[in-house]
Amino acid sequence: MSDTHYYHGLAKSMMFTIILVSFAPLLCIVLIAGYQYSVVYEEKVEAHLRELVLKHDQSVDTYLEEKVAEIQVLAEIIELGRLHDPASLQALHDALVRGHGSDFVDLGLVNSKGIQAAYAGPYKLQGVDYSKEEWFKAAKKNKVHVGDVGLGLRGVPHFTIALRVDEDGQEWILRTTLDFIAFNKLVEDIRIGETGLAYIINRQAEFQTTPRRDMTAEVPFLRQMAASMTGRFEMVRGRASITVKTIPTTGRETIFVTSPIKNGDWIMVYQQDAADAFSELNRSRNLALLVLLIGGISIAVMAYLMSKRMARKVARADAAKDIMNEQVIEAGKLASVGELAAGIAHEINNPVAIMVEEAGWIQDLLEEGLGKEDNEREVQRALNQIRTQGGRCKEITHKLLSFARKIDPTVKSVCLNELVLEIVQLSEQRAKYANVIIETSLADSIPLVEASPSEMQQVFLNLVNNAIDAMDPGGGSLDIMTRVEDNTVVVSIADTGCGIPQANLSRIFDPFFTTKPVGKGTGLGLSIIYGIINKMDGTIAVSSAVDQGTKFTIRLPIPEGEDTSACDFRINEHGTR
């Protein structure tokens, strides 16, 4: 837990979690709201363009209908005979110019053979033959016809309104030419943004007005569009359709809004670059992305700072927890020393009694004198006995002091057989008082493991003391076994005590849980053991049955490439099996 890499990884994990939890809802909201806004905005723009085109579509149709109506009124209220007179026709044309400005460029009367019999206007078109003109043929057939824009004989753009008039069984065509500039300006008034423009084409995709810029790139698409609409003008009349097309030559995505006019003979076309039409939407998107970016950076910075702060707090908490664990283990160890005190006292009492007896015997011999018989040799024997018993006391106290010293959590390469033997020797006297026989079955050769020696002593001593308590006062057998299994060193401690009820097995490692009488246990022993083994990447398991006994099994991993010779030497040095 004290590893710097662990806390660095913890901080990184918390940072990414905070970023994900904080940024994901923001991103979802921006995407959903942005999508909804885009859909609504695009629909609004398309609806506006449709309405604009239809409005100008109606204006153009109304303009043409008004001019047709005016010519029809002239034909109805003025006698045809007056129209044959050039002077009367000129006066009528002048009246039209005064009333409508330059809309009516000229006025002419054409007979049934297509010859213009009378003409009033700025051009010399008297006697011109129009029999092959499309507008002449259409007027004879339909009575009223508005022709396409063309250069005609005069060489300037214009279009003709022709009206068939019948008099005394003879057909006459009253025709007038409308000013193209005024008509073109009427269409050019449709303009939105920087790239929006409107124009009129006929069924052959020929321009009937003059666009403000070169339309060469759009001509192929306009031809396809005009061809697709041919034959269904009446069905779509009064409705504007929208098409988005990428012009190959320019690579720009362009919006086309089309609507038929003049009874479907012409098509009103409005076009605008999509980027220009949706410029406000694009600006809103860019603003949303900017806000998202700033929000994301802010979240990342705050997540970084918070994760670092939280990781430091966790490190401090873990350090405090480690200190507390050490204190708890130390308290448990002192409690174990207290439990061993009676046995240790008895163990020391025997050699001390022998030393006292030998010391008294030496005193008696000294009173008799060393020169008498074998007194000197007897004193020498008594001194050797005192030295031997003193060494025995020293060994016992050394082991006790070694076990009772402060817990050292430092991980080292240790031999578990050696630790087991030390604990067995410390617990032998207490086991005798409880009528418990300790038997060991240690593997001849086991690898060293990475563990804290003092902490493992605490583990083994706690388990041995618990086993002795479980068999006191009736006595029993305590078996301790070590072996190597599946790349782990296994230590099992089995007793023939009272066992643990099945209902308590799942709780025995919980802190402060104990089945001992009040004052006999704190409930921390097995919890401490579990924490120590878990910290060393090991496992501890228990199996038990009431009145049959309990078995604890500890497994510690073997480090890769571990040598077993040192462990063998230490075990053989004890000379115990």
Image (cartoon, rainbow, N blue to C red):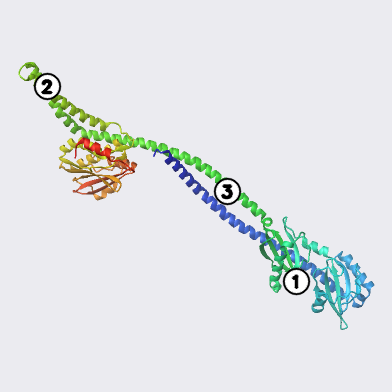
User: Residue 380, image x and y in percent?
Assistant: 11, 21
Residue wearing tag 1:
265
Q: CA distance from mark 3 to mark 1?
A: 51 Å
| Eye-nearest disc, 2 or 3 | 2
Determine whether label 2 and label 3 are within 8 Å by CB.
no
Above or below residue 43? Residue 290 is above
User: Residue 16, image x and y in percent?
Assistant: 48, 46
Which is more N-terminal, label 3 or label 2? 3
Q: Residue furthest left?
A: 373
* Residue 32 visible at all: yes
Determine whether label 3 and label 1 are within 8 Å by CB.
no
Q: Left or right of 290: which side holds 403?
A: left
Few, some or many C-alpha atoms within 10 Å of disc 1 (few <14, some 14-19, many ≥20)? some
Q: CA distance from mark 1 to mark 2?
A: 144 Å
Q: Secondary structure at mark 1?
A: loop
- For badge 3, the amino acid type reads Leu
Q: Secondary structure at mark 2?
A: helix
* Residue 364 visible at all: no
| Eye-nearest disc, 1 or 2 | 2
Residue wearing tag 2:
380
Q: Secondary structure at mark 3?
A: helix
Which is more N-terminal, label 2 or label 1? 1
Which is more N-terminal, label 1 or label 3? 1
Residue wearing tag 3:
292
- For badge 2, the amino acid type reads Gln
